[in-house]
């Protein structure tokens, strides 16, 4: 089916036909247009010894990032054994963030956070996986029964605050790579996005469905040029009245600001029409995500969409659809969920060709590898090369994240966005709720500072807990040889609740007033403290990353 | 210079700390405080300084469209969060809503005919339409130049519509009117001075009065009264106000307005709304709890206030002491009432249930998972009923568990032990805790109780009200103290004034003035008449709002 620019425009819905604001053209106009937020979630945890930038500044891991700090290289150490753990297990060339060097000055790597919720849960409701998955973007407590989050997720909150109304609502674009769970019977591990308390959004997992929604080819109402002319003519009339008010009476400061803001918006509408013409076009869409490629998924069942063979391609399309949706003003906020808690494909079965290093445990799924023993349980065992496999998977997701940044940057959207990548856990093998990491790119139009490896802990002493060579946690022997880190849940004292990052992102993407202050800023996300006594959220923003 | 800083009472009592202050030292032994919030000093006998341009609240925006056009689409739902001023999101929503409303009018033949009686496809008919509908939407007659702007748009019909039809042309005019600043803003352009104040025009008065009493635009009768100069006198205003409060349609609008104003007053909207929603209770302790009960809780409180104000024609003091309420089957068990069906039913409660603060809807929402919250309840009374400032708890306070021990038998004892030391005691010991103490006779879901953990509840306390230490033995004595408190009356007057002006700084009575007196002596409906006929309401200050 050939799509015209006209139907592309109509897909944006009457309410955002020529959505009102030029994205980059109104540097001085106040209030500013909203920014964009993208949340990427990946299952399990990172290999913490081969993930972090290898920065060193005056004896600390924390400080400015450089491309060099992301470079993949084996550890330099020899074969010594520290507390019974041979360091050689981390000597491999795979490195989680190795593909992100080009973005070193436009991103941050955040350490020293904890999951808002503490403790462990019954396996029936998703257990430790469910708790972290449900909390990651909600920072709400979790309910009994299925272990679902007790509050809405930050993407929904942001959409409510800044998204255009489409189909009568202001929802984020929630996309899912992999098989979906039914909201009626999934548990805490199944979802990261929530409309409200215990009301999960599983996300769209068929790229064709997401693409049709964006392009509106099901509706097909014509977006005629007369709509553009009408908008201009009415803007002329409104401008005339505003000018009459400006000159017709003595005005105080608040009155003057109101009129100036309004007149500025009329101008930005003009800018936006120009931007729309230039950027959000069928040509762009066909270049980034050709219809024929996406349409191969038409009619796929949920099980078919969950096939590991398509994981890479579907993920890639979802990333492109997110970038296009933001470009065309369809959404300011998107969430990309890769599979589900305790999930992740068996990467060995994905027909990825070369590049899978060492002894690749082809049949084991990501979760089974994350336990290091090839099992979904925590019993002792240690697969050959499993650290390397895990690092390779981190690196693979890092490349997807890089692609996401790349597409946004191609549209000049990255600097006006904040793109958050958070995993299910910090350390995958112990499934801890402490030492949660976030990779955050984009400054949301200057709200955030970038280019640093940041200690976000409450006392600024996170470096004390790190291995000086890997910048991962210190190594320590355990009864179970698969556990190698000196991680203690008692560390929660020093950690900052991850909800502060969500609060910061929420405020970062709000429109700003003439003084650059976010309009409608909140002191805490979630604003509602749910009744889960183990969910310990904190107020305020993550000042460590604010500009 | 009429503006000055007023140090808030909270600071003087050493009640400090707020979550999330960048300067706060979380270690607790030293807290860098920000400057106290600015407050305007109210000048007796002078009108409040308010902007000349004030965007309609969403409720007023919806009501205006519904009253004038007969379209009940709840168009404000397209406008995003209710923020001050005009934002990109809001403006795009206004545009979308304007298109939707115009479409709804044009596509409904009856409605279209009613609004466009001339039905001739020419500029004269367009002009007539703009003049008549515009008068209601603008709350004043349009000037010829203003009408001409619309005729320019009318003349461009072929360009701006798909099929160049009469209906489409009218639709575009309406779409433009619904984006007009004069429609979206309450405009007060008058400049004529009468001594130290500015005389509002009759239409400007009509607009203030109608939105204050109805949350809706002036009707034809009120615009006519304005045109005939009948709003130029206080007595004329009172006559119109009484008419507006007594006609069945008018009274219905006033009740709707008061429901909304009360919801604002009690914090059911805005940042405090979380306290009235998302109620989670341990259903083992509270079998009366069911998910979603908070909606019933809020509804009960708003219905209680409505019944007292409009069915009982009560006074402000009755809001705090009346034993009436309305319950449904969901709430009846909390009151130990049998035979209540799903419909809301008016009931008389016993003497243990005086007024607002003892309604299940209040005490049941202001609690924790497994207990009532003396702190939430006390802070509510201080901030909402007495308009006092109370700082937020220091960082981490939310997460601090109550202490336990053999000597700490009741929730009150545990709360008092928890808050006895610095930095808590400054706010808690003499203010928040006693302000909630009398309500210890209600548990976490709002049931009346005489014991907590097997020990008789202690509902006694001493709280400074109207500058004097006042002691009470129980909820009834406490409610009676608040009901006659000048501080509480002043607070309520300020809240209703702020609602009427949609401006938290607007104050008509600086304390002990005519409106406070009116509130303390007569019915709430009489008070509303006094409010809109108060001199300070009918005039503008000469100073512009910065």
Image (cartoon, helix red, strand yellow):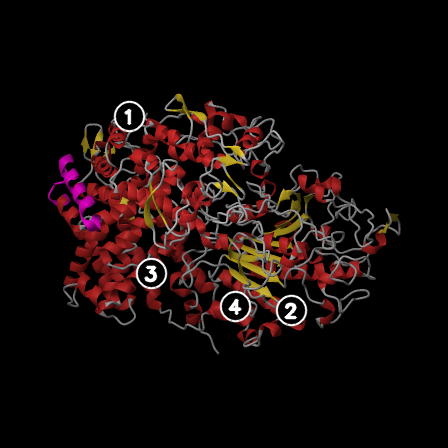
Q: Secondary structure at mark 2?
A: helix
Callout 2: residue from which chain?
A
Q: Which residue is mark 1?
A: B512
> Which subunit holds the residue at mark 3?
A
B456 w.r.t. A335: above or below: above
**Quadrant (top left/top right/bottom left/bottom right) for the C terminus of chain B:** top left
Q: Earlier in the sequence, mark 4 or mark 2?
A: 4
Q: Which residue is mark 3?
A: A231
> Is the Cβ of the residue at disc 3 closer than 8 Å to that at disc 1?
no
Task: Say whether marks 4 and 2 touch (CB < 8 Å).
Answer: no
Asked if residue B207 lies in the magenta stretch, the reply is: no
Above or below, A254 against B150 in this view is above
Q: Quadrant of the N terminus of chain B?
A: top left
Residue placed at 52% from the left, 68% from the top? A210
How crowded pointer 2 is (Cα within 10 Å; few <14, some 14-19, many 20+) is rated as many
- Quote the CA–CA distance across marks 2 and 3: 43 Å
Q: Which residues are magenta?
A: B226-250
Which label number is shown at residue A311? 2
Front position among marks 1 and 2: 1
Q: Tell me if I can see residue B506 in this picture.
A: no
Residue A56 in sight? yes
């Amino acid at each position: 089916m050939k799509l015209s620019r006209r139907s592309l425009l109509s897909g944006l819905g009457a309410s955002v036909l020529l959505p009102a604001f030029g994205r980059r053209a109104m540097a001085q106009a106040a209030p500013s247009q909203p920014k964009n937020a993208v949340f990427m979630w990946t299952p399990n945890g990172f290999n913490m010894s081969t993930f972090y930038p290898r920065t060193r500044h005056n004896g600390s891991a924390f400080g400015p990032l450089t491309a060099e700090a992301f470079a993949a290289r084996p550890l330099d150490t020899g074969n010594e054994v520290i507390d019974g753990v041979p360091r050689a297990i981390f000597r491999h060339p795979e490195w989680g963030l190795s593909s992100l060097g080009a973005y070193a000055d436009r991103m941050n790597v955040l350490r020293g956070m904890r999951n808002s919720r503490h403790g462990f849960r019954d396996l029936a409701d998703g257990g430790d996986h469910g708790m972290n998955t449900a909390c990651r973007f909600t920072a709400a407590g979790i309910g009994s029964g299925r272990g679902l989050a007790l509050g809405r997720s930050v993407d929904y909150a942001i959409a409510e605050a800044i998204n255009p109304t489409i189909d009568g609502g202001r929802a984020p674009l929630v996309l899912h790579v992999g098989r979906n769970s039914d909201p009626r019977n999934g548990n805490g591990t199944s979802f990261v996005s929530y409309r409200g308390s215990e009301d999960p959004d599983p996300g769209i997992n068929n790229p064709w469905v997401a693409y049709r929604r964006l392009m509106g080819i099901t509706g097909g109402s014509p977006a005629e040029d007369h709509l553009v002319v009408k908008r201009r003519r009415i803007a002329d009339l409104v401008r005339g009245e505003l000018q009459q008010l400006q000159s017709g009476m003595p005005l105080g400061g608040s009155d003057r600001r109101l009129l100036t803001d309004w007149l500025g918006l009329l101008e930005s509408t003009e800018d936006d029409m120009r931007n729309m013409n230039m950027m959000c076009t069928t040509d762009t869409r066909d270049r980034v995500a050709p219809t024929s490629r996406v349409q191969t998924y038409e009619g796929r069942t949920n099980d078919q969409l969950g096939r590991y063979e398509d994981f890479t391609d579907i993920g890639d399309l979802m990333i492109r659809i997110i970038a296009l949706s933001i470009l065309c003003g369809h959404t300011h906020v998107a969430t990309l969920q890769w599979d589900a808690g305790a999930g992740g494909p068996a990467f060995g079965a994905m027909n990825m060709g070369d590049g899978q290093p060492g002894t690749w445990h082809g049949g084991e799924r990501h979760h089974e590898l994350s336990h290091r023993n090839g099992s979904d349980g925590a019993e002792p065992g240690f697969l050959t090369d499993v650290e390397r496999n895990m690092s390779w998977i981190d690196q693979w997701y890092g490349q997807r994240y890089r692609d996401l940044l790349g597409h946004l940057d191609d549209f000049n959207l990255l600097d006006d966005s904040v793109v958050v990548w958070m995993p299910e856990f910090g350390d995958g093998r112990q499934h801890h709720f402490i030492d949660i990491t976030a990779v955050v790119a984009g400054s949301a139009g200057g709200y955030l500072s970038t280019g640093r490896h940041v200690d976000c802990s409450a006392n600024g002493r996170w470096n004390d807990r790190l291995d000086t060579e890997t910048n991962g946690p210190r190594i320590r022997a355990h009864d179970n040889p698969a556990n190698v880190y000196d991680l203690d849940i008692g560390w929660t004292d020093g950690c900052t609740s991850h909800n502060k990052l969500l609060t910061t992102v929420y405020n970062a993407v709000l429109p700003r007033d003439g003084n650059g202050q976010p309009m409608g800023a909140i002191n805490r996300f979630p604003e509602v403290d749910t009744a889960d006594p183990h969910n310990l959220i904190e107020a305020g923003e993550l000042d460590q990353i604010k500009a | 210079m009429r503006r000055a800083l007023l140090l808030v009472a909270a600071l003087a009592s050493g009640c400090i700390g707020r979550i999330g202050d960048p300067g706060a030292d979380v270690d607790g032994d030293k807290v860098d405080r920000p400057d106290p919030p600015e407050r305007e000093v109210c000048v007796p006998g002078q009108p409040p300084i308010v902007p000349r341009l004030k965007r309609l609240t969403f409720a007023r925006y919806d009501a205006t469209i519904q009253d004038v056009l007969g379209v009940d689409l709840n168009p404000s739902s397209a406008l995003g969060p209710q923020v001050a001023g005009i934002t990109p999101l809001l403006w795009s929503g206004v545009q979308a809503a304007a298109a939707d409303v115009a479409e709804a009018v044009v596509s409904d033949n009856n409605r279209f005919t009613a609004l466009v009686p001339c039905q001739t496809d020419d500029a004269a008919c367009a002009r007539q339409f703009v003049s008549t509908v515009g008068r209601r939407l603008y709350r004043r007659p349009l000037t010829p130049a203003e009408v001409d702007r619309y005729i320019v748009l009318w003349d461009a019909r072929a360009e701006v519509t798909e099929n160049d039809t009469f209906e489409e042309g009218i639709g575009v005019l309406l779409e433009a009117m619904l984006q007009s600043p004069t429609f979206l803003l309450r405009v007060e352009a008058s400049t004529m001075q009468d001594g130290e104040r500015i005389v509002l025009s009759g239409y400007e008065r009509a607009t203030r009065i109608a939105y204050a009493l109805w949350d809706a635009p002036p009707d034809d009768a009120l615009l006519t009264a304005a045109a005939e100069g009948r709003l130029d006198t206080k007595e004329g205003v009172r006559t119109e106000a009484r008419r507006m409060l007594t006609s069945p349609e008018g009274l219905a609008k006033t009740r709707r307005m008061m429901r909304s104003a009360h919801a604002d007053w009690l914090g059911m909207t805005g940042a405090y709304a979380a306290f009235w929603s998302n109620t989670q209770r341990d259903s083992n302790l509270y079998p009366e709890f069911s998910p979603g009960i908070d909606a019933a809780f809020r509804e009960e409180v708003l219905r209680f206030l409505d019944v007292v104000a409009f069915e009982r024609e009560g006074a402000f003091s009755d809001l705090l002491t009346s034993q009436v309420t309305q319950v449904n089957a969901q709430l009846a068990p909390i009151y130990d009432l049998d035979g209540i069906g799903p419909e809301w039913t008016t009931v008389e409660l016993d003497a243990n249930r005086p007024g607002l603060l003892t309604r299940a809807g209040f005490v049941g929402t202001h609690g924790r998972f497994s207990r009532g919250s003396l702190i939430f309840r006390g802070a509510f009374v201080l901030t909402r009923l007495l308009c006092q400032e109370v700082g937020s708890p220091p960082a981490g306070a939310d997460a601090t568990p109550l202490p336990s021990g053999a000597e700490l038998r009741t929730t009150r004892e545990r709360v008092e032990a928890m808050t006895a030391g610095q930095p808590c005691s400054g706010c808690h010991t003499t203010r928040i805790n006693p302000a909630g103490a009398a309500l210890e006779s209600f548990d976490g879901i709002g049931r009346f109780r005489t014991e907590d953990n097997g020990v008789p509840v202690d509902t006694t306390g001493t709280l400074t009200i109207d500058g004097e230490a006042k002691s009470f033995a129980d909820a009834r004595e406490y409610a009676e103290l608040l009901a006659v408190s000048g501080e509480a009356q002043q607070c309520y007057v300020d809240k209703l004034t702020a609602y009427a002006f949609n401006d938290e700084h607007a104050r008509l009575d600086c304390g002990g003035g005519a409106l406070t007196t009116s509130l303390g002596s007569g019915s709430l409906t009489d008070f509303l008449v006094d409010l809109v006929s108060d001199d300070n309401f009918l005039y503008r200050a000469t100073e512009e709002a910065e």
